[in-house]
Image (spheres, grey):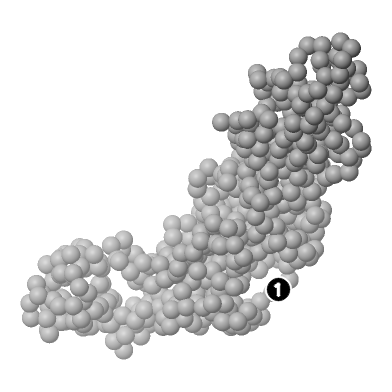
Amino acid sequence: MDIHYKNISLTAFLVITVLFICIITPYSAGSALLYKNYIVRYDKGWDILCDPYVVQKGDWVFKLFRQRGEISHKDFPKFLAIFKRINPHIRNIDMIRPGQHILIPLKKLKKDSLPGQSSGIVTIPFVTISNLPDIIKPLSTEYIVQKGDYISRLITRGYGSYGTKSYKQGIVLFRLINPDVVDLDRIYIGQKLYIPSPSLRDKPWYKSLFDSSGNIIVKADPNSPDTKALSSFVPTEKPDNTPSPFAKIASILDAKFLNKGIYSFPGHGGIDYRLDLSGFPVIELKDKTKILLSPSPSTNKDKKINEPDLTAIKSYWSNVKIVPIADKASTEQTLDAVMKSFEKKAFKNKISFSDQGLKVEVRGKWIIEQPHFAGEKKTHLCITPVNDPDERTPDSIVRYLEQHNIIIKDFLKDFLKDFKKTKDKSKKAQNENTKEDVIILDFLDRKTFVKNLLTAMGYNYAQNVAITFPYAGIQIKALSNLVSTGDGKSLLVDFGDLYGDAIIAIKKTGLDIIQIKEKDSAYKVIEKIFDALEVSYAKDPTFLAAKRPIIYNTSLTIPGYLISNKKQHKILLATASVNDDVVQFLINKGIKMIQTQRH
């Protein structure tokens, strides 16, 4: 059944969110609108639409009634006269009491202008899907994600076992009030979520939210400025569970995907143009820009929008973009066509930033400044197609970049591939405690610093070892510090106790020695030790986040030294503070973390 909304008159002064008074045909059952019953009372030749209301504590007539209805706004004395006549039990309007039932006159109605008007009770939609989150969110609980949490556990507490009908409804409501959670398998410790309260299930309108499959039936808001044309949506009996590249694109862009129902646009000569979303799906961005996907008509001649019809659409959707899609286009090709509909200046291929000395460079096929799409705080959406799940940016780096307002969106070119294996890995990684795996070296005391550094690198280090060496024809005894490597190499470390010819005499015995001076910086000390031990290292190493070419990758250049030992894992000696998520990334790569700390 199609529904056409015409000649809609709306007063901005109604408290009821979207109460609209109009000539309207009956709504289809299972509509996504919430409904409210209103009373019709006859008064001096007019039917008066009335809102039944129970007086609350703190209510008083002039405060309460001026907020309600067309009559009150236009002629308040007339409103009071009508109010007194239809509420004869209220003898003194200045003395209304909490708990009293009253009728608030809203609007004069022409005869038979609303279905059921003659019966004295009419049912009018008062909440649409567009503001449903505003209704659900206050009835939800704010929750901070803890270690070990996952969405299904949080929902089962109030909505029953996994897989049940009530559980699925709980998930639908969770998605509705947490639009930023695109992937239910990707939540992180400390993230703020809203959990729908089980008390919602007791609301009289709760069941009307869902169709037979447990999904909310999406209806456009008939009173929003850009949808005056309005639409009716007819739910299919069985949902189409076939993956869609269009739906994937909407998910990538954090947008709504509309592919069911019919929009009716008033056209030339009073003939409406009917836009069937099953043939012409729409992606609606957060800033209400609509992307109308126009598939190729090569296989279906009916899949074509004529110029007059396009004019009708654009006259109601001023911010619509018509994007032609080639037949059998891939997700990447379709997304490319969508991106080309926007100005080139909206996109970048690379962004960089510095974080306490760590240099980060993010490259992607499309990097979008979010206000172009969302109207929110300045963030960047970095979108890149990949061939395999293993090429995706690791979750730890995704979380790290999100802290710097960069949202990573890697998607598979073949969107039918199974993500389960990748998701399972990410769940395990995000709950690991990185701090326990990092060795912190304090540079306040050089002797302790050297000892801890060599020990962390896997060497044996003995302090105050007695040594003898020939000097001027005699054997000299002294104390020094001895480093022993696994391959039999030994090295003395002196902190200024040996002088001049003594150093030369020791080296003549075949024993190497390095001197750490008071003025040496941490970098100088480290490099003296590495050079003496013939340690292979790279200074300020750069790591690629994902297993893919650098052209569409994130690189992290970390101040410090990457050490490669034959018998050990790689060791990163970082000389700057490194974020926990970056540390987690490095540990997952099999790199042992040592971090210097200076004061």
Report if residue 378 is visible in the image.
yes
- The quadrant of the picture occupied by the N terminus is bottom right
Which residue corresponds to the image point at 66% horizontal and 76% vertical from the top-left? 239
Report if residue 211 is visible in the image.
no
Please tell me whether residue 292 is drawn above or below residue 150 in the rendered image: above
Query: On the image, which quarter does residue 100 sit in?
Result: bottom left
Please tell me whether residue 462 is drawn above or below residue 144 in the rendered image: above
- State the residue lying farthest toward the bottom: 119
Frontmost residue, 490 versus 476:
476
Please tell me whether residue 58 is drawn above or below residue 459 in the rendered image: below
- State the residue lying farthest toward the front: 474
Which residue corresponds to the image point at 18% horizontal and 69% vertical from the top-left? 58
Give the image location of residue 192, x and y in percent: 51, 59
Amino acid residing under circle 1: Asn
Query: On the image, which quarter does residue 112 sit in?
Result: bottom left
Please tell me whether residue 226 is drawn above or below residue 41 in the rendered image: above
Q: Is residue 226 left or right of residue 168?
A: left
Query: On the image, which quarter does residue 46 sit in?
Result: bottom left
Frontmost residue, 77 versus 402:
402
Which residue position is annotated with label 1? 241
Give the image location of residue 33, x and y in percent: 46, 74
State the SS at label 1. Answer: loop
Q: Is residue 421 left or right of residue 220?
A: right
Which residue corresponds to the image point at 42% horizontal and 81% vertical from the top-left? 203
Which residue corresponds to the image point at 53% horizontal and 42% vertical from the top-left? 378
Q: Is residue 335 left or right of residue 11?
A: right
Give the image location of residue 35, x and y in percent: 40, 78
Give the image location of residue 576, x and y in percent: 64, 34
- The quadrant of the picture occupied by the C terminus is top right
Frontmost residue, 177 versus 454:
454
